Image (cartoon, helix red, strand yellow):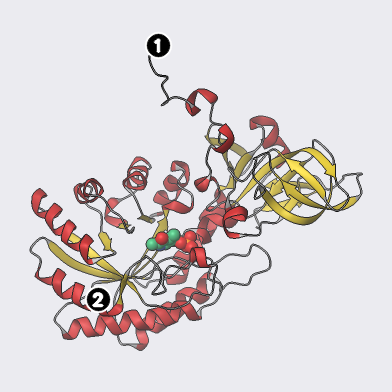
Amino acid sequence: MTFFAYHAGELYAEQVPLSRVAQQVGTPAYVYSRAAIENQWRALDDAFGDYPHTICYAVKANSNIAILNLLARLGSGFDIVSEGELRRVLAAGGDPSKVVYSGVAKSVHELEFALKSNVRSINIESVAELHRLQAVAASLGVTASIAIRVNPDVDPETHPYISTGMEKAKFGVTMEAAFEAYKLAHTMPNIEVHGIACHIGSQITKTSPFTDALEIVLNMVKRLAQAGIQIQQLDLGGGLGINYQGETPPAADEYVQAMIAGVAAHGIDLPIAIEPGRYIAGNSGVMLTTVEYTKHNTSKNFAIVDAGMNDLMRPALYQAHHEIIPVRTDSSAEPVSYDVVGPVCESADVLGYERELALQSGDLLAVCSAGAYSFAMSNNYNSRTRPPEVMVDGDQIHVIRRRETFDQLIQGERQLPD
Ligand SMILES: *Cc1c(COP(=O)(O)O)cnc(C)c1O
């Protein structure tokens, strides 16, 4: 988290002290660093060098339109999983010809919208979806450019809830079924086979699951070529992990070079798309929260903060670890082992267990690595309004999403007539 660092005992985002952000927008609040986001994107882009490639940022990791717009300005493509995400990309000035559309349950309406928007590839996740897409494309009188998302049945060695490329997962088409599906697609009048896609999971911290999956994908490309079906793009998915708690995932360069080398070793010469989400956004943001109370039971100390599992669900959902650090290091309080807990009426509402912190009521904490799957997964449980999002750029603070208001919270609700 190099763009979040202490200066004179105070935590900064770039050149802005986080206490100033808290003063301006209150807490809880999400704070992102523009430089961090751009740096991560460029690390992947640079790693490809002259090799033909598209970086399709996985919108679901953090879909704020300011972030999508910054990435679009760099020339990024996007990986989407819904019509809403495609609408966000278009609203942010993204180029639909660099959009790949994943997702297991695309509706007729979503497929129509994607075809009308001219996305690069609809990544098919089942034979049933292929039939639906053929019908939708025929009804619009257009040709749909597709990839089949194959399930290579490799273990990404990550949390089961973020493993997607094993046979028991709902995602993708098994290798044997994929070959038949490609042959079927090839005969469909309104389908054009463009690519092959695979995404095996998230927060992957080794290169081998990626290269194992790549081998399986490349063998399929060759088998398809023998059957007269020419693949034009390899979409190798996202999943590159980040450091939450001392993990040592491969660097961008190592990961990209492994992919390029694997492709070259098969004598295959095809453009590569990747779909990174977490790698770009994860360590580019923190969530700021204020200690409301401390509470000391016989066996436990609690730091009760103003952010809860509705604001940051990952610890409750995946037992995920986020570092929690003080915004100022000059506390006069004694360091104590705290469970950092939120206001939500659930025992799972814990942001971190047994964290050694020197705290008192009113202190500001930063929950680290909160740029991806954090605000994006937030919700209104307990009628809590969602926090604002702030983008720091140098010494500037930009509010890129205002704090939700109570009126917004109930705007779609109606009482019965008298
Ligand atoms: C979630 C997802 C991604 C992004 O995964 P990260 O681990 O955030 O890089 C990419 N592709 C697909 C199909 C996904 O579902």
Q: Which residue is mark 2?
A: 177
Quadrant housing residue 259: bottom left
What's the residue at 66%, 30% (across, down)? 24
Q: Nearer the viewer, residue 101 or 391?
A: 101
> Residue 27 location, x and y as percent?
67, 35
- Asked if 372 appears above or below 271 in the picture, the reply is above
- Give the side of residue 218 with respect to residue 391, left or right: left
Question: Is residue 8 visible to the viewer in this orientation of the structure?
Answer: no
Q: Earlier in the sequence, mark 1 or mark 2?
A: 2
Local SS, label 1: loop
> Residue 358 location, x and y as percent?
86, 48
**Dot 1 and dot 2 residues touching (CB under 8 Å):** no
Quarter of the image for the C terminus: give it. top left
**Residue with the most extreme top position:** 418
What's the mark number on residue 403?
none
Q: Which residue is mark 1?
A: 418
Q: CA distance from mark 1 to mark 2?
A: 57 Å
- Mark 1 is surrounded, within 10 Å at the Cα level, by few (under 14), some (14 to 19) or many (20 or more) other residues, namely few
Callout 2 amino acid: Ala
> Residue 363 location, x and y as percent?
79, 39
Mark whose residue sits in front, 1 or 2: 1
> Residue 392 location, x and y as percent?
60, 42
Q: Is mark 2 within 8 Å of ligand 1?
A: no
Q: Nearer the viewer, residue 200 or 160?
A: 160
Callout 1 amino acid: Asp
Quarter of the image where ligand 1 sits: bottom left
Local SS, label 2: helix
- Mark 2 is surrounded, within 10 Å at the Cα level, by few (under 14), some (14 to 19) or many (20 or more) other residues, namely few
